[in-house]
Amino acid sequence: HVKADKNENELVDLFETDLYKNFKKGMKPGDYVRVYRENLGLSQPELGTQLEVSRAYVCDLEKHRRFVGKEMAKKLAKLFDAPVDFFL
């Protein structure tokens, strides 16, 4: 969640904003990994630890240098509470 405005105390779900919805149209699986990771405040090494992979593996996913397989997509979906198809 992010603040909507400096003068407001209301938090907004980033994933519900028009900015995100427009950005999402061109997103690839690695983009979802990065967005969800950053939204949870995790570093690449922290995400790697949770997924039992290296930081370099996470980086490769985010940079589209590594394919997200079905099993990894399931792990990501469970961890991020997101649809599996975001990561495939």
Image (cartoon, rainbow, N blue to C red):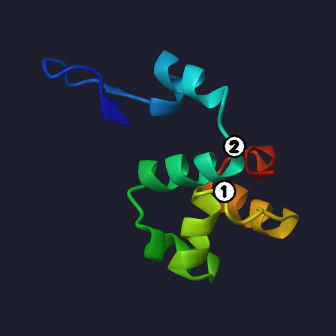
Image position of 29 with respect to 73: above or below: above
Mark 1 near mark 2, Cβ–Cβ under 8 Å? yes
Give the residue drawn at x 62%, y 83%.
52
Classify mark 1: helix, strand or loop: loop
Q: State the CA–CA distance, disc 1 to disc 2.
A: 8 Å
Is 69 left or right of 49, judged from the image as shown? Answer: right
Query: Residue 38, image x and y in percent?
Result: 43, 52
Give the residue drawn at x 45%, y 31%.
14
Q: Decide: few, some or many residues near mark 1? Use Cα within 10 Å; few <14, some 14-19, many ≥20.
A: some
Looking at the rendered image, the disc whose residue lies closer to the viewer, 1 or 2, is 1
Image position of 63 with respect to 56: above or below: above
Instruction: Return the residue at label 2.
Output: 28
**Disc number for residue 47:** none
* Residue furthest right in the image: 70
Identified by mark 2, the residue type is Lys
Instruction: Return the residue at label 1.
Output: 64
